[in-house]
Image (spheres, rainbow, N blue to C red):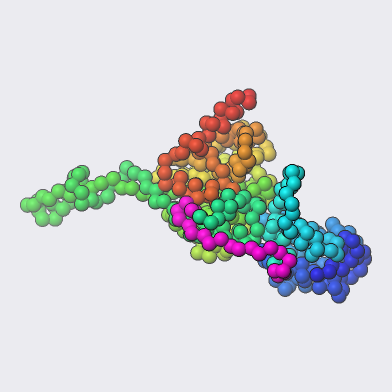
Amino acid sequence: MEVAGGEDGLVSNAPPAGRFADNIVYFARTLRAAGLKIGPGAVADAIEAVEAIGTGSREEFHAALGAVFLTRHEDKPVFDEAFRLFWRSRNLVEKMIAMMSPKAADGRQRERPRPGESRAADALLGDRPDNRPPREEPDIEIDARFTMSDSEALRRMDFARMSAVEIGAAKRALAKLQLPLERVRTRRFKPSHIHARIDPRATMRAAMRNGGALILPRYREIREIQPPLVVLADISGSMSQYTRIFLHFLHVLTERRRHVHTFLFGTRLTNVSRQMRHKDPDQAMDECAAAVKDWSGGTRIGETLQQFNRIWARRVLGQGAVVLLITDGLEREGTELLATEMDRLHRSCRRLVWLNPLLRFDGFEPRARGVRAMLPHVDEFRPVHNLASLSDLATALGAVRSPSHDPRRYLDRMKGGA
């Protein structure tokens, strides 16, 4: 593929005719292969947009294509990386081959891959099997803990660094997840055939039916139920690389458990419990995206928790509810309100689990003000950035609290740092 234009791939003040228009079509195919939803109409609109504004600068060209092709906030990193790889010099394929070819190891520190880079590279060279090394998908066998004998690397890979193929494999793994059946004892009773606890009311009602001539004892036992699961997920810009895969995990939870309530928040709180009940996960994701107005925007954790505690807490936090709070804790405003609402939320539920993708970094320390305000009010502090962490979480939902995820370890660091 040869990109028309000069060294930067653009022709100043020239209409995108001939080969340049064809390259826009090829670029759209690349984006579609990388996972973006782009139809023929969008390609025609992109060509018209470039004709309308001209191609005077690379920034204007990038903005024109992004305005047409980008319909979801979480697709922007993939679009940016695909644009960087596609619209550059003429020797695109040769440079991609050189970039992906094995090289002798050296002592220099390797640069971390950019978010969306692997998906964009797979889309660009997906139809050139002779120019890229063969890629074999591992044979994956999954149980309740995602035990994958041949794919440990996939289990440990960060969601933000996965390619399109690896994200698809991760979604299939999530679909096969088996959750433990958690039960809690209530103060209510149910009829029982076990002769352990007599039910006086049921016994008297049965005796009244035959005039009291025969009194046969009836029995009861403590009723056990599956507690409600309430999820508060951060969809701000700092969490955009994880939002989509988290929603797939929450969709699995909604299918496998009863009474799952899902709330998304950035600068405002949105209840998407109804949207998450769709059987088709893609339809559920699309309806969630349509319902949320502040996707990949700012963060106001304190205000959204205040709204949840005031409006929704009494409705969904009964019967020993478990709360999953998914956020990085990077609050941009004052932390006084955040600490107050976190304490109120902690007192309203049976168990509060904070899932933070920042824990993927070794030596994480709670230095951010939002993290320091939230940490004293949680029962567990867990990472959530790969399949291994999600499998551990799924197992922990049906078990007792794990000492290895006790937030007091980080509280001691806070006191020592102070």
* Left or right of 194, for residue 228: right
Q: Is residue 373 magenta?
A: no
- Is residue 408 visible to us here? yes
Q: Position of residue 167 (x, y in %)?
A: 61, 58
Q: Position of residue 169 (x, y in %)?
A: 57, 60
Outermost residue, right side:
13
Could you tell me which residue is drawn at 10 percent across and 55 percent down? Answer: 210
Could you tell me which residue is drawn at 50 percent across and 37 percent down? Answer: 404
Tally the marks.
Answer: 0
Q: Which residues are magenta?
A: 127-148
Image: 407 above or below 205: above
Q: Where on the picture, by quarter, is residue 197?
A: top left
Q: Position of residue 370 (x, y in %)?
A: 63, 36
Could you tell me which residue is drawn at 64 percent across and 61 percent down? Answer: 164
Outermost residue, bottom side:
18
Which quadrant: the N terminus? bottom right
Which quadrant: the C terminus? top right
Image: 182 above or below 100: above
* Left or right of 192, for residue 187: right
**Which of 191 and 110 lies nearest the eye of the viewer?**
110
- Is residue 347 visible to us here? no
Image: 139 above or below 342: below
Q: Position of residue 218 (x, y in %)?
A: 18, 49
**Which of 75 and 155 lies nearest the eye of the viewer?**
155
**Which of 400 and 112 lies nearest the eye of the viewer?**
112
Outermost residue, left side:
213
Could you tell me which residue is drawn at 52 percent across and 60 percent down? Answer: 140
* Left or right of 400, for residue 298: right
Magenta span: predominant SS is loop
**Which of 266 and 381 lies nearest the eye of the viewer?**
381
